[in-house]
Image (tube, rainbow, N blue to C red):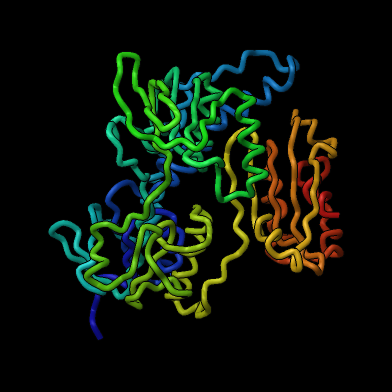
């Protein structure tokens, strides 16, 4: 039998790796990470965690101002202090994650890893071998190929922006574009969002994404639809973003046109591992074309949402498979997803578009969330919920726009995942009065 340096070697040390690695180490396997940036990857360092810390100030501002003077104060956001708080909290994560892994005996190599063969990875002038390799390299921000691209900033840049600009142009209206727009608008910045089509958030039902855009417009954000960005020029007052529909001036221009899987310079071509712009192709066991090389997280080409919980689920699945604890194909659960704007937009399970395409399989129940008195406690003024049921009356999907949509979808996830019957739902006696009580009440 060939002796390898490690039983499992991860390329990348984000959620697609470090959530599963402890299971292997605790079972006595020799495990290592190869990381070329920061331990923890995108989410803890320049993604979800950073975003939600900054957005907390927006939530506080909303409640204060919505109270109509019950709580006094202007609610103005000091962006510099907000960013300093974010940096203080975020700085904890890389060392904390690395320290926790090292306590389990897991080794770290820092540098760009490249596959030399099915069991060998090079990191600079170092070479390490492993029986199994897991590619968990994640994604990076896409950058428009236009004149003046050097003036564009991505989400990583924005999440370290110490001074809020006066005027900001955001190119793109996906999760990152709208979340950034919502935060900057709350911080007093004049924000313009440029869309290349007539809709935002293609992952969501258009009725709901349009409702969110309309609310953000009422808050003062400008949306320019069906506009192709042509160039960015530096001018005396800052920057001029030239598009097919006009020119828009800004002090800060953000490219939020999507994210691209980190597949370059990994040696995939030489091993016959298939990939394209959507990511690495895997089978139902998350194996690449080379059976002992797996892929997890955002670098994977898949239909499931590319989110931290998805990467975590995949990482733990691969670890259990390598330990012989799970020999079945991966079976994804219902995965909730949220746009952290004000208000929120969240969904899980079967979508409204799927339900509309298969009326013989699904029924949709519409709910005006403002019918529930508890929504007024938190100063909510608008919101809507759609519940998708199968023909046996099991809840199979939900989507909501409201100030606490993420909490509602979280509360409904068990019912969606485990197909609770109406009788089972009636057994859930949740805490009253809470938003969770309201969520379950909407099902009965």
In this rendering, the answer to whether 119 lies above or below 147 is below
Query: Which residue occupies the foreground of this view, 98 or 227?
Result: 227
| The furthest residue to the left | 125
Say if residue 298 shows up in the picture.
yes
Relative placement, left or right, of 141 versus 185 is left
Q: Residue at x 67, y 38 (%)?
A: 211
Percent from the top left, x then y, of residue 239?
34, 22
Q: Residue at x 44, y 74 (%)?
A: 283
In this rendering, the answer to whether 80 lies above or below 329 is above
Q: Residue at x 22, y 72 (%)?
A: 117
Percent from the top left, x then y, of residue 208?
66, 43
Count of marks placed on residues: 0
Figure quadrant of residue 271: bottom left
Query: Which residue occupies the foreground of this view, 264 or 327?
Result: 264
Query: Which residue occupies the foreground of this view, 239 or 443?
Result: 239
Q: Residue at x 56, y 24 (%)?
A: 186
Instruction: Work out which quarter of the rendered image holds the C terminus and state it.
Output: bottom right
Say if residue 102 shows up in the picture.
no
Percent from the top left, x then y, of residue 285?
46, 74
Query: Which residue occupies the foreground of this view, 388 or 394?
Result: 388
Relative placement, left or right, of 350 versus 267 is right
Instruction: Work out which quarter of the rendered image holds the N terminus and state it.
Output: bottom left
């Amino acid at each position: 039998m060939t002796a390898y340096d490690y039983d499992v070697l991860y390329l990348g040390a984000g959620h697609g790796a470090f959530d599963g690695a402890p299971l292997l180490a605790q079972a006595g396997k020799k495990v290592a990470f190869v990381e070329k940036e920061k331990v923890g990857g995108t989410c803890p360092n320049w993604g979800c965690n950073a975003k939600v810390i900054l957005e907390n100030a927006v939530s506080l501002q909303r409640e204060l101002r919505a109270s109509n003077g019950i709580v006094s104060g202007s609610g103005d956001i000091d962006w510099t202090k907000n960013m300093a708080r974010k940096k203080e909290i975020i700085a904890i994560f890389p060392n904390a994650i690395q320290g926790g892994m090292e306590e389990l005996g897991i080794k770290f190599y820092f540098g760009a890893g490249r596959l030399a063969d099915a069991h060998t990875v090079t990191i600079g002038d170092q070479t390490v071998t492993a029986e199994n390799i897991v590619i968990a390299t994640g994604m990076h921000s896409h950058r428009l190929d236009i004149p003046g691209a050097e003036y564009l900033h991505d989400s990583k840049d924005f999440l370290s922006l110490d001074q809020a600009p006066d005027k900001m142009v955001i190119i793109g209206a996906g999760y990152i574009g709208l979340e950034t727009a919502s935060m900057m608008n709350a911080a007093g910045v004049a924000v313009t969002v440029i869309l290349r089509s007539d809709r935002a958030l293609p992952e969501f039902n258009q009725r709901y994404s349009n409702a969110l855009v309309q609310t953000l417009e009422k808050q003062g954000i400008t949306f320019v639809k069906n506009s192709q960005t042509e160039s960015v020029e530096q001018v005396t007052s800052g920057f001029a973003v030239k598009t097919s529909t006009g020119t828009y001036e800004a002090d800060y221009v953000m490219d939020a046109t999507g994210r691209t899987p980190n597949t370059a310079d990994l040696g995939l071509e030489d091993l016959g591992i298939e990939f394209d712009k959507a990511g690495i192709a895997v089978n139902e066991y998350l194996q690449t074309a080379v059976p002992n090389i797996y892929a997890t997280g955002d670098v994977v080409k898949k239909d499931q949402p590319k989110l931290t919980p998805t990467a975590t689920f995949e990482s733990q699945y691969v670890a259990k498979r390598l330990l012989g604890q799970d020999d079945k194909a991966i079976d994804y659960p219902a995965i909730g997803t949220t746009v952290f704007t004000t208000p929120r937009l969240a969904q899980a399970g079967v979508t409204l578009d799927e339900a509309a395409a298969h009326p013989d399989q699904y029924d949709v129940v519409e709910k005006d969330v403002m019918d529930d008195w508890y929504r007024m406690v938190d100063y909510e003024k608008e919101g809507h919920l759609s519940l998708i049921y199968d023909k046996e009356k099991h809840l199979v999907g939900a989507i909501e726009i409201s100030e606490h949509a993420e909490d509602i979808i979280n509360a409904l996830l068990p019912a969606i995942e485990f197909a609770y019957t109406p009788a089972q739902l009636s057994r859930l006696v949740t805490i009253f009065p809470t938003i969770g009580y309201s969520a379950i009440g909407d099902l009965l």
